[in-house]
Amino acid sequence: MRVLLVDDHPVVRAGLRALISGFDQMTVAAEASHGVEALELLDAGLDVDVVVMDLQMPEMDGVRTTAEVRRRGGPPVLVLTTFDTQADVVVALRAGAVGYLLKDAPAPTLRQALIDTAQRRATLAPEVASAVVEQLHRPQPTLSAREIELLEALATGASNRELAATLFISQATVKTHLVHIYDKLGVTNRTAAIAAAREQRLI
């Protein structure tokens, strides 16, 4: 099994490389420090069975990168992160991650997660599985027309100042709308809000 490691911390990558290389019939084929670099490697023809993806990275975060890998028909993604909040888990899975594991997982658990992910079998850390169940039982959010309008503008990459100018409202009002949007979508940042809104066909 060939693995692509995507993490912005060299020490973490070194540790994972040593660990994964010690598993039978597994090898780290390449490393990337952010999403853009990972996509460039895959576009260049890198042949891997699994992508191990961190969430918080510069240039392009793990959620956006996972969505792009999926859109391009790339290999399955196993998210390996320290973030276990419901918002992080659900947004990553919505983006197309096959598995979600925490970085403190035991070595045998990581090995099995890699095998399952390569075979496109869903694998979730026990600590985060409950977040998925809770989200499934939660009613779909209802956004106002104004909030959807703001989300659509947000998806263009506009700043708060630009959003305020476009919608003819104050920056304080923009921030208030964003707080309400994040709460309704169960997310904590712009990228996750846009991903969740698109997944639920709100924009």
Image: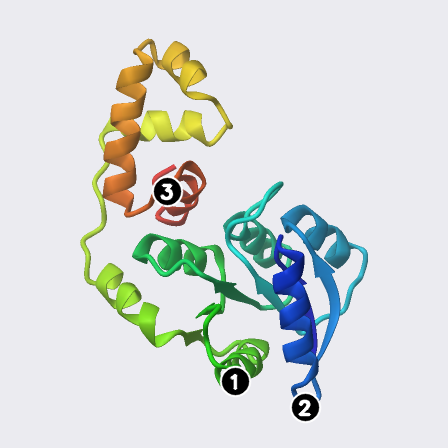
Q: Which mark is residue 187?
A: none
Q: Which residue is mark 2?
A: 24
Q: Is residue 150 left or right of residue 35?
A: left
Q: Which quadrant is home to the C terminus? A: top left
Residue topped by disc 1: 112
- Amino acid at the residue labelled 3: Ala
The residue under the point 33% across, 57% down is 85
Report helix, strand or loop for mark 1.
helix
- Up/down of 69 relative to 18, above or below: above
Q: Earlier in the sequence, mark 3 or mark 1?
A: 1
Q: Which class describes the residues within 10 Å of circle 1: few (<14), some (14-19), or many (20+)? A: few
Q: Which residue is mark 3?
A: 197
Q: Amino acid at mark 1?
A: Gln
Q: Nearer the viewer, mark 2 or mark 3?
A: 2
3D distance between C-alphas at marks 3 and 1? 32 Å
User: Horizontal and vertical percent for residue 164?
Assistant: 37, 14
Query: Callout 3: 10 Å neighbours few (<14), some, many (20+)?
Result: many
